[in-house]
Amino acid sequence: MKPVLKIESLKKYYGKSKTRTRALNGMTFQVMPGEFLGIMGSSGSGKSTLLNCIATVTRPDGGTITMNDRPIHTLKGKALSDYRGKEIGYLFQNFELLDHLTGRENILLPLSLHGVPEKESRERLEELSSYLEVKDVLHKFPSQMSGGQKQRIAAARALILKPGLILADEPTGALDSKNAKTLMEKLSGLNQKEHATILMVTHDSNAASYCKRILFIQDGVIFHELRRDLPTETWQEFYTRILKVMAQLGGGSANVL
Amino acid sequence: MFSKLILNNSRQSRRENGLFFSSMLASVIAFYMILSLSRQDVMIFLTQMESDAVEKLLSMIPVFYSMTLFLLFFLIFYASKYQLERRRHEFGVCLILGMSRIRLFSMLLAEDLSSSIFSLSIGLPAGLLLSELVSLVTARLVGIGIVGHQFSLSWQAVLWTAAGFLLTKSMAFLILSGRISRQEIDALLSDTPEGAKKQMPSFLYGVSLLTGILCLTSAYGTAICGTAWTGLHSMGRTLLLGTLGTFLLFYGLRFPLGFLIKAVKNDRQLHIFNIRQIQEAVIRRSGTLALCSLLILAALCCFGAGVGIFRSYEESELHVLDYTFPNSENEKDAETIRQILTAHELDTRFSDLFEIEVGHIRTAGHAEHPFETEPILAALGDLPPSNARDILLNNLGYADYPYLISLDSYNRLLDAAGLPELTADTGEAFVYMDREFVDSERTELMNQILETFPETRLDDTSIRLAGPLQTTDLVTDRSLTLSFALILPEEAFSHYTQGNYEVYVNGILEKDLVEDAGLMSAISDTNQILADTGLSFESYLQNMGRQLFYMVAASYLTVYLAIIFLIIANTVIGVQFLMSQQKAARRYRTLIRLGASCPVLCRSARKQINWYFGLPLAVAACGSLFGVRALFTGLLSSGARNGMSEMIIVSTSMILALCVVEYMYIAAVRRSSDRYLLGLMVPEREE
């Protein structure tokens, strides 16, 4: 099976030679189709830079990122826009819904941007809104929704064009535990039923326990890897393992790794 | 170090907000020009003959000036607010680094002062130059000699311009910077959301839209049919209705915009996003948009009406005679006048001198109605009813004791005017009515009647009236204005006047003299020589001066107001758009994350700019079509309304020209918006 995303020796440095910070210092890993991969690390470990490099928000200083056999640094103009909108779906910590558009309009925004006729995605909208339980709030503005509803609308927006890879940047960061649990169950369900490939950056070990594999990164390199032993390992067992790794590697939420 | 920081910041502000800075410059120029009006050559010249009217006009200037200062305050307030809002984060950082609030306040004050002085140092010389240019051009156009033109720097205008400008800027600045420097540091460092919008039931917006349209229709209706102009009360009601209507219309606009969103079947290229942005702007700032629309409407009306009035005075009269020496008391007969002129070597200045003989019926004794008007009134009564016919019926009802004009002398006048001479048989008379009493419609009606040669009686003798109706001015200005007269052949004239008539000697200046010095100077010089002769006279200068005064007054004030209104409205719209665009930076960043390319974003922003400018502009343009018409109804005399349709065409073309100005503003805002969006495309997160 070919990997969806291939990252090789990825480097990103900030600052000049003397004060240089190595945000990514030659990171290498792959994401396989249908995988639910979690990235954990402390603040400044480079996880957000990694996500930004994949999302083409930041240009790396070295190494390659290959998405479906296509190196993304070669993308320009329309191809780059299509990559951002169609090949990856982005789920933000703060939802980033446009507050002057209704739920439906927010979800359909990528269609408008990429010139996809709405009727082609009508079924997909129905399907996603029922699955994510946001049918009742489609006509509402974000200011009239709860945090969980906002994030599920944002998830529907990220999924509407069936992207090859969903990038989630601390998706539960702004949610309470109940809404966080619902969201993670939905994402996990999508991963299992639709084989959606998800790459999630998180601080939250609870959220991370829904992943199939977790990479712990520190100082720009992969420090440790955990794999959930499916189907035998239960969610609780995996969660305990994550906590154990965290405890062994420094413990406490102040120093996640 | 501190002063360097201030100068750099102020330079940076000017560079970043060129639109606002250019508007400031234009305001300074306009201020200087209106305040230095009294120093314009044309005005100095007019003061000599129409001093009362000129005084009145000049006394009105401070009112206009104060009014525009008041409006300018809002412009400066909005634009400065935008500039300061952009720098909130910077102020927060300054405070957190230990800068005292007083120092921050004085830094902002110094920056503002430096910008104002810069605007004045460019604007005042530009204003001076432009006002000199206008002075020279108008002087040349109206024929005042420009040889005597002197460079005229009006210190008073300079001082008032600087004082007014600085005062307005300081007031706006004090309010804004006081507000900013009082804020907590965390409030300055964080982005300020605009607050949740209040949504009302949509039927309320529909009702508001409908009421707005009704108010506007009623306001324009009363203004066009003329009832609005009957008194202060009705005018106030019309203005209130119009203003209220515009505000309600803009408030209700979210209703059709909501429909527009529902109607979109296929959302391409951020169409819904654009409409939602516009809807939000309308929701948040419907009042400002309505105000801007009213200002643009006022500007368009001022421009249209100014040009229309200018044209109406320019074309109102045919100029034939330069001088008239009235001789009603027969103290000096025509021959004596000629002798006096020759004695003062003035005869060489005239190419033609001829008499116009005008008298009353002296044969009728004490008869009250020596002229029978019934046949004309009956013929008029047979014509289809019209406003013009009613006016004629009313005026001719009093024409039973008409003046008589000698045909020979009238033919001399026609000859001088380059018109064909008239011939009349015995028992025949031509009808004369002064241009002031007939317009083209009434002339046509009279000619229709005169074509039938109506028979009537003059002092019990049958007389046949002939056409066409004669309207050429008998004297140069206003010493003789006849509402109805009969032009009689010499024999009949002598008979009816019994040789007892008034003589007016008309003079036409030598062509070379006029061509060399310009008409105004030629008349002006001749007047000075004539003053020594003791002759009473009237010259075309009074006539021309009056026309010129109206032309200058109308064009200067209306153009000045139009420019100021336009500047204010456009800058407020432009600055507000850019401000809301910056507040929506996060939305644009999200769009970029979702794959929006720079051209797509720029196109979307351009569409929004078109809408943002287009809405108030379209409402104003529609309104101005009625507004200019209403102004013509209210301001122009019936005589000047002759060429109403032509004037409306002129005004429409002026409005189109102003649309070009609008386009230039839109282009400037588009450029700023493109630049801003391009900046957003650069990765925002650099750790």
Image: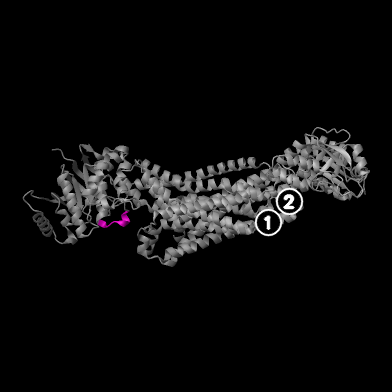
Subunit that carries the residue with mark 1: B
Asked if residue A146 is among those painted magenta in the image, a careful observer would answer yes
Q: Which numbered disc covers residue B186?
A: none
Tell me whether circle 1 and circle 2 mark residues in contact (CB < 8 Å). Answer: no
Asked if residue A51 is among those painted magenta in the image, a careful observer would answer no
Residue B104 pos. (x, y %): 43, 64
Quadrant in which the N terminus of chain A is drawn: top left
Question: Real-space Cα distance between discs 1 and 2?
Answer: 12 Å
Mark 1 lies on residue: B58
Q: Which residue is drawn at 63% across and 45% down?
A: B307
Lateral position of residue B387 relative to residue B679, left or right: right
Quadrant in which the C terminus of chain A is drawn: bottom left
Lateral position of residue A205 relative to residue B43, left or right: left
The secondary structure type at the circle numbered 1 is helix
Subunit that carries the residue with mark 2: B
- The number of discs equals 2
Residue B495 pos. (x, y %): 93, 41
Mark 2 lies on residue: B46
Residue B154 pos. (x, y %): 66, 55
Q: What residue type is labelled 2?
A: Leu
Pointer 1: residues within 10 angstroms few (<14), some, or many (20+)? some
Q: Can residue B159 be seen in this view?
A: no
Magenta segment range?
A141-147
Residue B49 pos. (x, y %): 76, 52
Q: Which residue is drawn at 20% across and 38% down?
A: A68
Lateral position of residue A155 relative to residue B456, left or right: left
